Image (tube, rainbow, N blue to C red):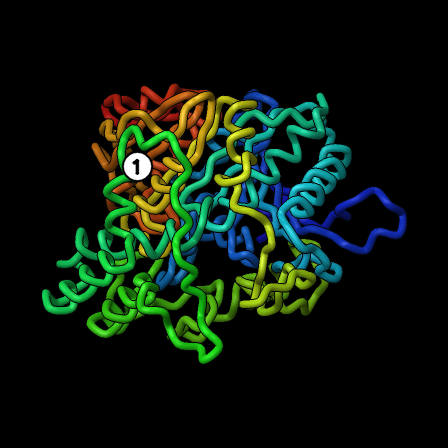
């Protein structure tokens, strides 16, 4: 592990400059392999809320990847350091190695604290004025628009935000984004899910009875009606803790789990046996191999400059929004409005002109049509939604030297771009696109950093950092 220590900067930094500040975020900064490259930093965020960004570091886009069920890490051919300087940040307080007592209520505070932390980082590592790119997945769909908005409001030449990318995000109303699109998702993937025709007919009837079909028929169109979409019925758990029949996502997951005992909502193509992870189990997932959790190893913690013996969890067992209250309170309640609903994401798109949102088509938790539905309900740069379906062919360059980290190549998905927003979908990726389709994700980073244009995603080409096709 010593060579790693020489080439990166891990540690804890206070989130403010106050002398009595006890709250600290953990970060792991890795310089670009291109020493003469642009002065810029890409910052990666995982979601949750409450899950560690080291998930991405170890299994998606870091210098090496240690995939589930494999005996050791391998060098990552699609390491983002080939493109730029990268930092993985654990936040908010309560996640991973972070220090201090969680005390936030909403995403405005998330944004303020991250910007303040980054100011301390920029001062410490002399990167003030370097271009900043935010990227992440899942609940980062809430985090990053608010964080991006906080950078924009700061309006500092020391903190020049240039672009934002989020894959498989939660952006809008969870009922519309998840329940309303769950049955069409199951219909499309019925053969893979193994759901029989009788069950599917029942699910389809429920989809229609709950009004979801009529909503999708009218509003998941290109262009959509230039009006706000109707608010769908609240399907939160009742006082008796019974599932609402219109919670179709839970019903689809239940049926799929009956057929496939190892069903994975994040990547529906997974089957038995489940594979052990050195990150440890997420939530109640069964971890079949008693691996030592990588980030709880004493040698790793020494390298990372964190308190020895710290009990690191891949996702926090405690709330990271502890001051939030709600009538249907769950483990983590975020009182913020969805960023696609209140102008936050709109402002980021309009101010930056370089925002990318994508989806893995095997993700059942936050499926592609749900994300598109949220975007069709949002106005940016003078028009609501995409005028045309983002259906251009997405080409991922071939790469002969896989070095233990293979990735699909050729035409692997679809993309579209309108008015400063790029949308893409990758057919054989799940919730974690950089891990499932690292070549495609690498191409998206090339767009985010301005190395290629969105239109280049449709071209048979090489990566900008190495040859792949010839």
Q: Position of residue 164 (x, y in %)?
A: 51, 32
Identify the element where label 1 is drawn.
loop
Q: Is residue 291 visible?
A: yes
- The image shows residue 215, relative to residue 446, as above or below, that is below
Residue at (63% x, 65% y) in the render? 298
Residue under label 1? 401
Residue drawn at the location 35% of the way across and 24% of the way down: 417
* Residue at the bottom extreme, as displayed: 240
Q: Nearer the viewer, residue 297 or 212?
A: 212
How far from the left and from the top, in percent, is residue 345?
52, 35
Q: Is residue 7 visible?
A: no
Q: Is 313 situated left or right of 262 in this image? A: right
User: Where is residue 89 shown, x and y percent of the image?
Assistant: 61, 47
Q: Residue at x 43, y 60 (%)?
A: 234
Residue at the spot 32% in from the left edge and 61% down from the top edge = 249
Instruction: Out of 378 and 6, give the one closest to the viewer.
Output: 378
Left or right: 145 in relation to 284:
right
């Amino acid at each position: 592990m010593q060579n790693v220590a020489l080439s990166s900067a891990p540690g804890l930094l206070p989130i403010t400059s106050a002398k009595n500040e006890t709250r600290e975020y953990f970060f792991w900064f890795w310089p670009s392999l291109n020493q003469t490259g642009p002065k810029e930093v890409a910052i990666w965020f995982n979601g949750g809320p409450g899950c560690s960004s080291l998930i991405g570091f170890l299994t998606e886009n870091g210098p090496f990847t240690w995939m589930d069920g494999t005996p050791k890490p391998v060098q990552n051919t699609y390491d983002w350091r080939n493109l730029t300087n990268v930092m993985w940040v654990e936040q908010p307080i309560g996640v991973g190695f972070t220090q201090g007592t969680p005390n936030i209520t909403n995403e405005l505070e998330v944004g303020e604290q991250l910007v303040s932390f980054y100011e301390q980082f920029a001062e410490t590592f002399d990167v003030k004025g370097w271009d900043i790119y935010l990227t992440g997945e899942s609940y980062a769909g809430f985090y990053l628009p608010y964080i991006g908005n906080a950078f924009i409001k700061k309006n500092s030449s020391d903190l020049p935000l240039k672009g934002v990318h989020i894959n498989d995000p939660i952006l809008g109303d969870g009922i519309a984004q998840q329940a309303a699109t769950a049955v069409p998702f199951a219909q499309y993937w019925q053969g893979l899910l193994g759901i029989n025709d009788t069950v599917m007919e029942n699910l389809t009837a429920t989809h229609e009875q709950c009004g979801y079909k009529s909503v999708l028929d009218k509003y998941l169109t290109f262009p959509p009606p230039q009006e706000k979409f109707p608010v769908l019925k609240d399907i939160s758990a009742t006082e008796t803790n019974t599932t609402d029949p219109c919670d179709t996502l839970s019903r689809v997951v239940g049926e799929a789990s009956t057929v496939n005992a190892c069903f994975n909502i994040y990547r529906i193509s997974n089957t038995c046996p489940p594979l052990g992870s050195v990150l440890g189990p997420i939530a109640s997932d069964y971890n079949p191999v008693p691996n030592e959790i990588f980030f709880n190893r004493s040698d790793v913690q020494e390298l990372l400059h964190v308190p020895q013996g710290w009990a690191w969890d891949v996702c926090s067992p405690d709330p990271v929004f502890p001051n939030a209250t709600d009538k249907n309170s769950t483990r983590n309640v975020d009182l913020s409005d969805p960023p696609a609903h209140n102008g936050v994401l709109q402002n980021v798109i309009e101010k930056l002109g370089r925002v990318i949102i994508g989806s893995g088509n095997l993700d059942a938790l936050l499926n592609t049509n749900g994300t598109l539905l949220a975007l069709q309900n949002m106005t940016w740069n003078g028009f609501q939604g995409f005028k045309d379906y983002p259906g251009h062919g997405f080409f991922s360059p071939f790469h002969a030297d896989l070095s233990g980290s293979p990735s699909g190549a050729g035409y692997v998905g679809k993309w579209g771009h309108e008015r400063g927003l790029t949308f893409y979908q990758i057919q054989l990726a799940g919730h974690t696109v950089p891990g499932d389709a690292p070549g495609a994700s690498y191409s998206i980073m090339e767009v985010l950093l301005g190395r290629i244009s969105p239109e280049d995603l449709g071209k048979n080409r090489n990566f900008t950092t190495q040859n792949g096709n010839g």
